[in-house]
Amino acid sequence: MEARSHTVTNQAPPLVGYDVFTCDRALSEAVARHLPAELLDGVREELRGLGRAAGSEQVREWGELANAFPPRLRTHDRYGRRIDEVDFHPSWHRLLGKAVAAGLTDAWGRPGGHVRRAAGFLVATQAEAGHGCPVSMTHAAVPALRAEPELAAVWEPLAASRVYERGLRPAAGKAGVLLGMGLTEKQGGSDLRAVATSARPLAEDGAYLLTGHKWFCSAPMSDAFLVLARAPGGPTCFLVPRVLDDGSRNAFALQRLKDKLGNRSNASAEVEFDGTTWARRVGEEGRGLRTVMGMVAATRLDCVLGSAALMRQAVAQAVHHASYRAAFGGLLADKPLMRNVLADLAVESEAATVLGMRLAAAYDSGTERDLALLRIAVPAAKYWVTKRCVPVVAEALECLGGNGYVEESGLPRLLRESPLNSVWEGAGNVQALDVLRALRTEPAALDAYLREVGEARGADPRLDRAIRGLLAELADLDGVEARARRLAERLALVLQGALLVRWAPPEVADAFCAGRLGGEAGAAFGTLPHTLDLRAVVERARPVE
C-alpha cells in the first residue's frame, strides 16, 4: 500500500491524447482563411490526422527517444572499410516516416500546397523539432533544382514523394528521397561568397569533381546535397549524391558530428570532399548564389514556422498546467498576474503563427505583389520571430515552476531548441542586412509591404501611429546599417499588428497593439494593461477541442 505522504495531488495531467491542429485556433483559422473552399474539408481531415498523431503519447515518446539517444557516427565498418554512415534511433525514422507521409516535403506542385504544408510542419514540429531539418531542406531544394530542368525532372518527384525510404542506395531505385545542403564553410560562415570548395569540370557535360570542406552539413544520411563550390566561372551550385548511379558510394567523408546545444535528434556533420567527389552542376556557372537563394528563402520561412511551433507548444503546456494547478486559494489560470503572463505569451504565439501562415499563402498565390512581399517580409519575420522564441519558451517553463525545469516536462528540450532557428540560415545580422538590401534594390518589395499593412489602416490608432513611425524611420537613412536590427523589428511588428487587427479576435489584436505597438506594456511578459480582456485571450490559447 502506498504511504499517505506519497499521494499525488494538485498536479496537471500530461498534455497528451489531443489534436494539436484542431486545438490551435490561430492555426486552424489561418488554414481556413488562406485555402480555397473546395480544398478545405480534405485538408482539415489530413491535418486533424497529423494533429492527433502529434499529440499522441506514442509520437511524443518517439520524440523523447530520438533525443535521448542521439545519432552516432560510424566512419568505418568492422573490416576497416570507409562507410561514413550515421546510425539513428528507430524513433527518428518513425518520425520522418510520419512527416513524409503527411506531405511535408510536397508543397510546390499542388493547390494550396504551401499553406497545407506549413500548417503540417507547424503541427509536426510540436511533437519533435529535429526531424524537421531534413524535411525542410528537401522541401526547399525544389526551387534550386528547377534551375536545371533535367535534374528537376528526376529529383523533384522523389523529393515530393509520400514514401520515406531509409538507407543509402541509388536514387533511381528508391520511392522517395531526402535532400540536404552544404553551404557553410569554416572560413566563410554566412558569407557564401567566401566559398573555398573548388569544382573542376569533367569532360561529361555538367559533371565536376569537388575538393573542400563543409563546416555544417545537416542530415548527412540524406540521398543528395545541394552544395556551393567555386567553379572556373565563379560560385556555382551543385548536386552531390551520396550514392552514384552504378551503386558505388560517392566520396563524402564525414569527419565528425557536431555536439549541439539542442536539436539532438538530428545529425549535423563536417564533410570532406577529396577531389574525387562527383557532382552535377545546378544552373549556370557563377550564378550559384542566385540559384540557392530560393532554397534559402524557403528554409528561412521554415525557421519562422519552426519557432512558431515551439512557442505554441510551450504556451499550450503553460496554459494547460495553469488550468489544473491550484495555489493561494484557486487555479493559477484564474490569478490576475498569472493570467497576464499567459495572455502575453499567447499573443506572441498567435502573432508568430498568423505571420508565418500569411507568408506561406504568399507562396501559393504567386502574384507579383505577394512575391515582392516575401522578399522583405521573410527576412524581417525570420529576424524577429526566431528571436522571440527563446524568451517565450523560457517564460512558459517558468509558469510550470520547478516542474518545468525537469526533463520529463518536455520544456527543457523546447528551451534548448529555441535558439536554433535564429542561428540557422543566417543569424540576426544577416537577416537585418538582407532587409536593407531589399529596401535599397527592390522598390516593389517595400511597396508590397506598405500595401499589406495598409489593409488594416484605420482599424486601430496604435497601429496607425506605428505605421507612421515606421515610415519616418524609412525616410531617414542616416546610419541605417547600424539601425538595421531596429528596422527589421519594426517591420515585423507592424506587419504582425496589421494581420492581427484584420484577422484575430478583437481581444488578441487589442492586446498586441497595446503591448507591442502602443508602449503600454513593460519589457517582460506579464505586463499588459489589466483593463484588457486577458481571460478571453488565455481561454483561446487553451489546448482543448
Image (tube, grey):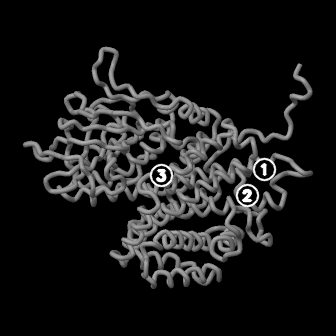
Q: Regarding mark 3 in the picture, which secondary structure is present there?
A: helix
Which residue in the protein does label 1 denote? 322
User: At 47% from the left edge and 79% from the top edge, which residue is drawn?
Assistant: 451
Can residue 211 be seen here? The reply is: yes
Give the quarter of the figure containing the N terminus: top right
Q: Is residue 418 left or right of residue 425?
A: right
The disc, 1 or 3, on the residue closer to the chain's N-terminal end is 3
- Pointer 2 residue: 342
Residue drawn at (18%, 56%) of the image: 234
User: Disc 3 marks which amino acid?
Assistant: Arg
At numbered mark 1, what does the secondary structure look like: helix, strand or loop? helix
Between discs 2 and 3, the one toward the N terminus? 3
Judged from this view, the residue extending furthest toward the top is 79
Of residues 205 and 24, the one drawn nearer to the viewer in this rendering: 205
Residue occupying image coordinates x 31% and y 50%: 187
Relative to residue 218, is residue 333 drawn left or right? right
In x, y percent, where is residue 541? 70, 56
Query: Is residue 58 rendered to the left or right of residue 527?
Result: left
Crowd tier of the residue under label 3, counting other residues whose Cα lies within 10 Å: few below 14, some 14–19, many 20 or above: many
Amino acid type, callout 2: Leu
- Which residue is the site of mark 3? 117
- x, y percentage for residue 317? 69, 47
Taking depth in this image into account, of 82 and 133 the one nearest to the observer is 82
